[in-house]
Image (cartoon, rainbow, N blue to C red):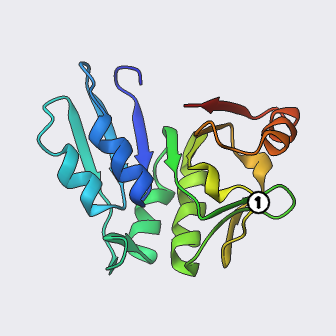
Amino acid sequence: MKPKDKIIIASGTTLFAFAKEIDVKENITVITSCVKVSFTLCYHPSIEIIQLGGIMRKNSVSVIEHYAENILESLSCNKLFLGVDGIDLDYGLTTSDMSEARINQQMIDAAQKIIVLTDSSKFGKRGFCKICNIGKIHHIITDKDAPVHMIEMIREKGIEITLV
């Protein structure tokens, strides 16, 4: 991350783990729907947090619905860090909840660069609700067990992939 970045961090266990690893020296702003992410980052002196408001989704400890969406409509951010329940080359990125899909779509519209953080088990899977086509994203960060044939096909679409 760069100084003065304005980033969005979506909800989910992978994004919560990501938030725990953020260590920046320069000031950044984090916009998030996830209360756990806000709570994790709130003690970091270089991070300003914008906690989206709305109806609490208890299983993900995140907010959804129109209050959060209205805030996102007025923002322009450098990056979005997004988690998914499925990545299907034909259908796109998916999640298990309709309201979560909607807020993820709003986050995508508010960000200049879309970075998906996911483990290899999500490749070739479809969740209940579509977030977006795969062509909307710029970068996927996943583990080394991701299926090689899918990684190659995604790279052919011009999407950067980092294996960790």
Q: Is residue 97 above or below residue 86?
A: below
The location of residue 73, given as percent across then percent down, is 50, 59
Looking at the rendered structure, the kind of residue marked 1 is Gly
Give the SS element for disc 1.
loop
The location of residue 99, given as percent across then percent down, is 52, 78
Q: Is residue 32 left or right of residue 134?
A: left
Tell me the quadrant of the picture where the C terminus can be found. top right
Report the number of discs.
Answer: 1
Name the residue furthest front: 145
85 or 46: which is nearer to us?
Answer: 85
Please name the residue shown 55% across and 44% down the image.
111
Tell me the quadrant of the picture where the N terminus can be found. top left
The location of residue 112, given as percent across then percent down, is 59, 38
Q: Quadrant of residue 71?
A: bottom left
11 or 79: which is nearer to us?
Answer: 11
Mark 1 is surrounded, within 10 Å at the Cα level, by few (under 14), some (14 to 19) or many (20 or more) other residues, namely some
The location of residue 118, given as percent across then percent down, is 56, 49
Q: Quadrant of residue 2?
A: top left
Q: Which residue is mark 1?
A: 124
Please name the residue shown 78% across and 39% down the image.
151
Q: Is residue 97 left or right of residue 25?
A: right
Please name the residue shown 25% across and 59% down the image.
36
Q: Is residue 14 above or below residue 21?
A: below
Please name the residue shown 54% across and 49% down the image.
110
